[in-house]
Structure formats: C-alpha cells, structure tokens
Amino acid sequence: MFEDRFLHLYNDSYPKIYFLPFIEALTSITADDMGKEALAESLKEIHITNTQDHHNPSNAFSFSNGILTLDHSPILNADDVDSRTKVLVDLLENNL
C-alpha cells in the first residue's frame, strides 16, 4: 500500500481516505439500536487494500460475506471524505 514517492502524503491522506469515512459511516448506521444490532450481526471483517488504484468509492468499496473491503488508492481524491462516507453508508445499509 505504500509507495516511497508518496510517503509525505500518507499522514494526511490515509485518515481521509480510509478511517474518517468509515468512522462517520459507522456513527451514522449505529445511531439507533436496530443499526447497532444489524452491523454487529453482519460485519465480520474489514480489509483495507489498494490493488487497483481506485479513486471512485463506488468502484473501490464492496461488502460480501461479512467482509467490507476498502480497495482505494491511498492518495487519490483524499479530500473527498463526504463522498466516501455516503458510499459506505449506502453500501452497508443495503447489505445489513
């Protein structure tokens, strides 16, 4: 997931690409007990990868067999946190 030429960007981009959208999506989904229960029953693993250099979250995020995969470039479109959050919320809500 790391490329030496982009190491200077990772402290800023990793949280924006992987962690902030995930935290915000979980906060949204677990706002009530029904969401908490559905998430606890359905989400088993989270995989963070970069196999395709995706920069569009619609192509980069998937959920199957209890595994949420975030296969997103660690640097591209880092500031688009809201878009990634929306895609994650929709993806999880539709699969719980």
Image (cartoon, rainbow, N blue to C red):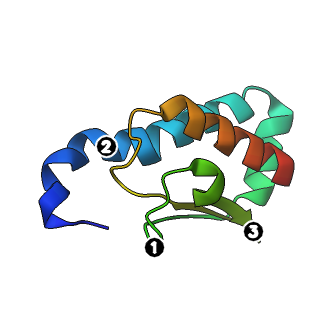
**1 and 3 marks in contact (CB < 8 Å):** no
- Identify the amino acid type marked 3: Ser
Q: CA distance from mark 2 to mark 1?
A: 17 Å
Q: Which residue is at a point 55% across and 50% down the rendered structure image?
A: 56
**Earlier-in-chain disc, 2 versus 3:** 2
| Mark 2 burial class by Cα count in 10 Å: few <14, some 14-19, many 20+ | some
Instruction: Find residue 76 and report its horizontal and vertical position in percent.
Output: 38, 48
Position of 27 relative to 51 (above/below): above
Q: Amino acid at mark 2?
A: Ser
Most foreground residue, 88 or 6: 6
Q: Is residue 10 above or below residue 24?
A: below
Cα separation between marks 1 and 3: 17 Å
Q: Position of residue 49 (x, y in %)?
A: 45, 67
Instruction: Report helix, strand or loop for mark 3.
Output: strand
Residue 79 in percent (x, y) is at 40, 32
Residue 51 - label: 1
Query: Where 80 falls versus 7 (above or below)?
Result: above
Give the spatial CA distance, label 2 vs label 3.
26 Å
Q: Earlier in the sequence, mark 1 or mark 3?
A: 1
Q: Residue at x 66, y 35 (%)?
A: 86
Callout in the foreground (2, 3): 2
Q: Are marks 2 and 3 in contact (CB under 8 Å)?
A: no
Residue to which mark 2 is pinned: 13
Dot 2 and dot 1 residues touching (CB under 8 Å): no
Q: Position of residue 34 (x, y in %)?
A: 86, 36
The three-letter amino acid code for the residue at tag 1 is: Thr
Residue occupying the point 47% across, 33% down: 80
Secondary structure at badge 1 equals loop
Q: Secondary structure at mark 2?
A: helix
Task: Identify the residue under disc 3.
Answer: 64
Mark 1, Cα crowd under 10 Å, few <14 / some 14-19 / many 20+, is few
Give left or right: position of 19 versus 41.
Answer: left
